[in-house]
Amino acid sequence: MITVFLRFKVKDYAEWKRAYDLGAELRERYHVRSSSVYRNAKDANEVTALQEFDDLESALALSNSDELRSRMAESGIVGPPDVWFTEQIERR
């Protein structure tokens, strides 16, 4: 299982969340198995999202898609996100 973490700032969380919810079909098309959204407890406009994939190829395909970049820009994300790809090796 591949998990992608994205951390970024948004102009307005509620506006970003509406745009994120509209992206469900995009996540489905790129085979996102599950996704979660977290907000910084002290800054509601700092978001961490995680998405789980079966394989790295699917994760990279979504991350490199022009459609995702366009939607992220339109959603009010400020600056480039911090993104990291991980492979789960243990869960207890």
Image (cartoon, helix red, strand yellow):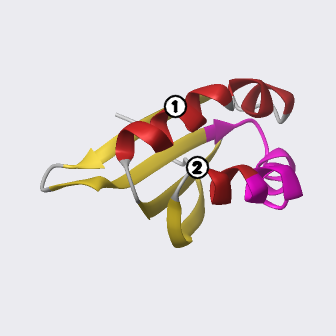
Q: Disc 1 on helix, strand or loop? A: helix
Q: Is residue 54 left or right of residue 21?
A: right
Give SS at disc 2.
Answer: loop
Count neighbours of disc 2 (C-alpha within 10 A) and say few if under 14, some if 14 to 19, many if 20 or more: many
Residue 37 screen position, x and y as percent: 42, 38
Q: Which residue is disc 1 drawn over?
A: 18
Instruction: Using the rendered image of the protein, determine whether residue 15 is visible from the camera's viewpoint.
Output: yes
Q: Amino acid at mark 2?
A: Ser
Q: Residue 45 at what x, y percent from top left?
A: 31, 55
Q: What amino acid type should be assigned to the residue bearing mark 1?
A: Arg
Q: Is residue 89 magenta?
A: no
- Quarter occupied by the N terminus: top right
Looking at the rendered structure, the number of numbered marks drawn on it comes to 2
Taking 67 as reference, is 47 left or right?
A: left
Visible in this render: residue 65? no
Residue 14 coordinates in the image, percent (x, y)? 38, 37
Residue holding disc 2: 75
Q: Considering the whole magenta stretch, tell me its main secondary structure.
A: helix
